[in-house]
Image: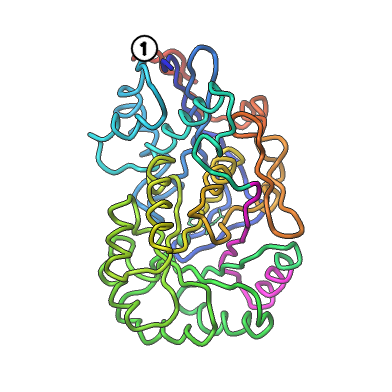
Amino acid sequence: MKIDRIELREIHMRLKAPFETSFGVVQDRRILLVQVCSDGVCGWGEGTAMEGPYYNSETIDTAWLMLEKYLIPLVQGRELESARDIPEILSAVRGNEMAKAALENAVWHLESLMRGMPLSRLLGGARQEIPCGVSLGVQSGIDALLALVEREVAAGYQRIKLKIKPGKDIEVVREVRKRFPNIRLSVDANSAYTLADTWHLKRMDEFNLLMMEQPLEWDDVHNHSLLQACIDTRICLDESIHHLRHAAAALETGACRAINIKLGRVGGHTEAMRIQQHCLERKTPAWCGGMIESGIGRAHNIAMSTQAGFIWPGDVSASRRYWDEDIIEPEVLVSPEGTIAVPLTPGLGYEIRERRIEQLTVRQQSYQSRTVLATR
Ligand code: OSB
Ligand code: MG
């Protein structure tokens, strides 16, 4: 397939409720979409960089810049065998995984359409349904949190993850565990602690958590290996893992015993595939993380989660938990058993609502044969 047109868009979508983590609060999402076309067939990818550089170092604006100035020119007008070729083509550019992933994943979608295959099957996934969990933001009070947990457990979700931060951790988890003694429960600190908090974090051991996600510095695997040696709760790394070598080193040094795989953070489907394969071979649980995606990112996450290494419920939940109106049709639905049925039509398996996307677009740029075509 020859890539003859690439388009970047920024759309604005408002979350039904603010989402709070240890690094900040977001309600108005600025979402980057990439469309890659060949012979009139177009694939879509979502850039999962956030509005500010507080989860990782990328933002929607840096991703746009990297795509426009460095990444798109490498792919524009190229004849490709497969989306698998993309990482090598982009390899001279360091880091910027979320920008790369948006582009690579759009090419994966395009390839699945051109081959007339479901993306999940093109990636080698076999699952017909995937297990789902939810991620609950930091809440103002314990009653609000308990009510939310109640609602999501009743909806069927198979794992509840609580965002924690200093001052809203041990006692919060204690209350939730007391009320729900048998649910699969985990916590995510988004790098809010340091090694000096080891004995504080060890108090989590009494709550029988499935895992504790990214307690320490975003770029420090070594300190996690020291912490993991002191606590019984399984550490899962999120922010620290940007590619297979990070994952392999983290497992080898005992820095974690589970891995959160996010398409954006690891640079796209090809690298995600390699990491889940590595986890599978080492019998280490991997699961699909989320970045509060629109339907396009959600559909990519669903396709990815059908691979054998994704054995724990992901943070892939129903569209309506976040959006009044999604940009795909049907929206992502979760069954009363807490699963998503994997769509098996060619491509992502959902219709892209282009008219809706048009309405939500605040900037847009087309690239064709290395020249800018249209701006608005
Ligand atoms: O750490 O997993 C995280 C959202 C934004 C940034 C980081 C994280 C999250 C979530 C939300 O936990 C997961 C979702 O999309 O539902
Ligand atoms: Mg996380």
Nearer to the camera, 199 or 251: 251
Say if 55 sits above or below 118 in the image.
Answer: below
Say which quarter of the image contains residue 236: bottom left
Q: Pick out the residue farthest to the left.
A: 92
Say which quarter of the image contains residue 350: top right
- Confirm whether the magenta stretch covers residue 355: no
Mark 1 is surrounded, within 10 Å at the Cα level, by few (under 14), some (14 to 19) or many (20 or more) other residues, namely some
Residue range in magenta is: 128-150
How far across and how far down the image is residue 338, in percent?
A: 70, 59
Q: Residue at x 59, y 24 (%)?
A: 116
Q: Residue at x 32, y 80 (%)?
A: 229
How far across and how far down the image is residue 119, in percent?
A: 55, 35
Relative to 97, is 22 on the left or the right? right
Relative to 362, is 271 on the left or the right? left
How far across and how far down the image is residue 308, in percent?
A: 51, 52
- Confirm whether the magenta stretch covers residue 146: yes
Amino acid on which disc 1 is placed: Ser
Say if 168 sits above or below 127 in the image.
Answer: below
Ligand 1 within 8 Å, label 1 CB = no
Say if 327 sits above or below 202 in the image.
Answer: above
Relative to 8, is 240 on the left or the right? left
Q: How is the image coloured?
A: rainbow
Say if 261 sits above or below 208 in the image.
Answer: above
In the picture of the structure, the residue carrying the numbered disc 1 is 369
Relative to 27, is 275 on the left or the right? left
Nearer to the camera, 167 or 282: 282
- Disc 1 is placed on an element classified as loop
